[in-house]
Amino acid sequence: MTAPIEAASPHTMNTYARLPVAMERGQGCRVWDVNGKSYLDGLGGIAVNTLGHAHPELVAALQEQVGKLIHCSNYYHVPNAEKLAKKLTELSGMSNVFFCCTGLEANEAALKLARKFGHDKGITNPQIVVYEHAFHGRSIATLSATGNPKVQKGFEPLVEGFIRVPLNDIEALKKATEGNPNVVAVFFETIQGEGGIHAMRVDYLKQVRQLCDERDWLMMVDEVQCGMGRTGKWFAHQWAGIVPDVMPLAKGLGSGVPIGAVVAGPKAAHIFQPGNHGTTFGGNPLAMRAGVETVRIMEEQGLLANAAKVGAHLKAALEQRLASNSGVKEVRGQGLMIGIELTKPCGVLTERALNAGLLLSVTADSVVRLVPPLILTEAEADEIVGILVPLIEAFLKE
């Protein structure tokens, strides 16, 4: 028997409020800790493990790639980078891709694109519209774009050049930018993840697309958490039938291998030129193989349809079981991106669920978040409900 995990490590920085568990292996939608205890994975590495754990086809492909070439400089062409870029442009209706390693990097690159877009038009002080409750990362620029004072506290002065507006209010957007010639872009998540699973409405997305076209702004859509099939379409904004100008991706694109991407349409695809942006590890052969294989397996195994079907089943079951509980404000989300908002902060449910054999997270203080692998079955969804609902009910009685 392995010794219990300490609550904090003496050698790693104290940047995470870690739970007292260490995972050792995974298979499908289950993981096992170092003591052999099994957990149903309702978190998917926070929307990362698209194919679950140890998917045999992905494992074989990555093993083969490790034996051939893990990394080479971006001084040289990487064939799978071109293959993955071509696939992403086909799926999105856009034209060019920049590869990096994380969602933060992808969002940072989007912000740079917007500023360069403005400067190329002669705007010396470009400004970008961002949203309340947004989360785009923890670098100085992306946390400035983020709409969470807790994330920003202690890191001031923040980067200037952001205009913040509420969600789903086109008149508020127009009013905040009225007569301002410095606005260059609107930047948002189609469904806010860390902000509490709040979605942009279809009609609002269409209105923003029209406004960006009218005013020559870039429409920049952060699909880092809600993209890559999670809602039942490749990208969540596609439910509105629109195409953005810039789309950061990461998380689920590599099924656990670190990868990020910025997909750009014609309006933004050629803003960056050699020397404007770069990254040492972005586009490396291992990550590109992970991305190529992830998309291939998703297509062959029908995982978008599965996310839509199983997600609808899971959401309906949660709604039915929790409908009469006054402590539950709302069950919301789409596909396998679901939030259960309670009437009081519920951070304790993360460890209680862990003890009960279920991995999940709590975001925005009072929202239980479920973003499991896209291979989740209806039986596993029912298992999530069976574990989670009694925990929520017991908590709300306290």
Image (tube, helix red, strand yellow):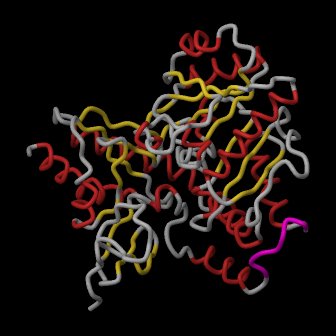
Of residues 79 and 29, the one drawn nearer to the viewer in this rendering:
79
Left/right of residue 303 with respect to residue 64 in the rendered view:
left
Is residue 116 at least partly visible in the picture? yes
Judge whether residue 73 is colored magenta: yes
Picture coordinates of residue 110, whole percent (x, y): 71, 41
Q: Residue at x 64, y 21 (%)?
A: 208
Q: Position of residue 44 (x, y in %)?
A: 46, 61
In this rendering, position of residue 142 left or right of residue 121: left
Q: Describe residue 23's horizontal placement relative to residue 111 as left or right.
A: left
Residue 379 in view of the camera: no
Q: Residue furthest bottom?
A: 1
Identify the image quadrant of residue 258.
bottom right
Residue at figure coordinates x 54%, y 49% from the top left: 138
Front residue of 214 and 255: 214
Q: Please, what is the dominant secondary structure of the magenta stretch?
A: loop
Q: Quadrant of residue 133?
A: top left
Q: At which x and y percent is residue 300?
A: 65, 61
The image shows residue 70, relative to residue 15, as above or below, that is: below
Q: Report the residue at 57% width, 50% height from top.
A: 304
Say whether residue 283 is magenta: no
**Between 166 and 290, which is closer to the camera in this rendering?**
166
The quadrant in which the N terminus is found is bottom left
Give percent across and percent down for residue 45.
47, 62
The magenta segment is: 69-75
